[in-house]
Image (cartoon, rainbow, N blue to C red):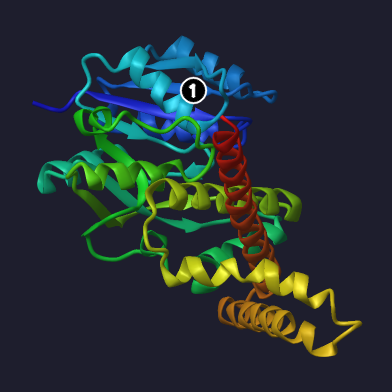
Amino acid sequence: MSPRLLIVVPCLNEEAHLPALLETLCGDPATQAARIVVADGGSVDRSRDIVRERAAADPRIVLLDNPQRIQSAGVNLAVRTWGADVDMLVRIDAHAAYPARYVSQLVAAQAESGADSVTVSMRAASLPGRCFQRAAAAAQNSALGTGGSPHRAAGARRWVDHGHHALFKLSAFRAVGGYDESFSHNEDAELDARLVRNGARILLAADILIDYFPRATAPSLARQYFNYGRGRARTALKHKPSLKPRQLVPVAIAPLAVMALFAPLWAWAALPAAMWLAACLAWGAWLGLRARSWCAAAAGIPAAIMHFAWSLGFLREIAAAERASAHSAIEHKRA
């Protein structure tokens, strides 16, 4: 018997991607008896109208208000509301494009492996005419932007401790309490830490690829990666895992940039930051040459933005935690 599926699409201002996304989901044979919940966090574009129009013609689709706005809360709310008689939970990110029969592939991968969670690989893509997005995509599709993260490239299937979330056995998801709703970013890695600790097995089906669309402007990319850094720090503080080299190296970028400010007093202070920036720009130029794209040749710019913003967010969260701990210790002594 086919598993009963709940498909959840957290959404906030995704009118550019929703029509094609819903078309792909509804055309998948595995979703014919599924419920497709779009958990909207207060979109002010046409996202909600698009979902309502599609729901009027297809009873599988439901629009769910997500008052907390963030993805973790939206998925949890959908599970509480619609998950009573469901076997599998599929999480779909609206800011992406999916292959035909994507859900069918996930279900088949889970049935074959018995995994508690099936994760997939993602490649960055750009929309026509968006040069900065093309540059960001080039960076994110290389070690320059990802540090060699396993779920950022196609490959063979293997067991991992983290990947891009796609499908869960709902029993495993519920057993660890779902997403931590205090996390606005890095909620996926935080949940995976609890899944692994609880004995769950996570499969990376790296042969299943989705296309992710990076932020199309420098400020939005910086905000995103600043929040990614904060989320990674919160996960590290909560679970105290050993950070991987690809996570440790970017932590140093913000301090290097601050050190460069002292160059008027000591010229050599700018050297480490200058070397890092030059390496980013050179690597980006090589990526552009390989792709024969002027836009991709600028990949070093979004890469530098990602590195610096992630580092700043990570260190800010660590500093905030240290201040909170010191304040708590003082209050404890006073008591």
**Disc 1, SS:** strand
Quadrant (top left/top right/bottom left/bottom right) for the N terminus: top left
State the residue in front, 161 or 209: 161
Q: Quadrant of residue 137?
A: bottom right
Q: Categorize mark 1 by other alpha carbons within 10 Å: few (<14), some (14-19), many (20+).
A: many
Q: Amino acid at mark 1?
A: Ala
For this rendering, which residue is in front, 213 or 29?
Answer: 213
Residue at the spot x=27%, y=23% of the render?
32
Q: Nearer the viewer, residue 190 or 83?
A: 190
Residue 102 at x, y percent in the picture:
32, 42
Residue 89 drawn above or below residue 310 = above
Q: Which residue is mark 1?
A: 39
Give left or right: position of 211 versus 205: right
Please state the horizontal and vertical placement of residue 273, each as a whole percent of the image.
Answer: 72, 79
Q: Residue at x 54, y 64 (%)?
A: 140
Q: Is residue 223 visible?
A: yes
Q: What residue sits 63% from the left and 21% below the top?
A: 42
Estimate the x, y position of residue 292 in percent, counting from the top left.
Answer: 61, 78
Residue at 58% across, 66% down: 251
> Picture coordinates of residue 223 (x, y %)?
68, 48
**Total number of numbered discs in the rendering:** 1
Is 24 located above or below residue 276 in the figure?
A: above
Q: Is residue 60 above or below residue 235?
A: above
Residue 147 visible? The answer is no
Farthest right residue? 264
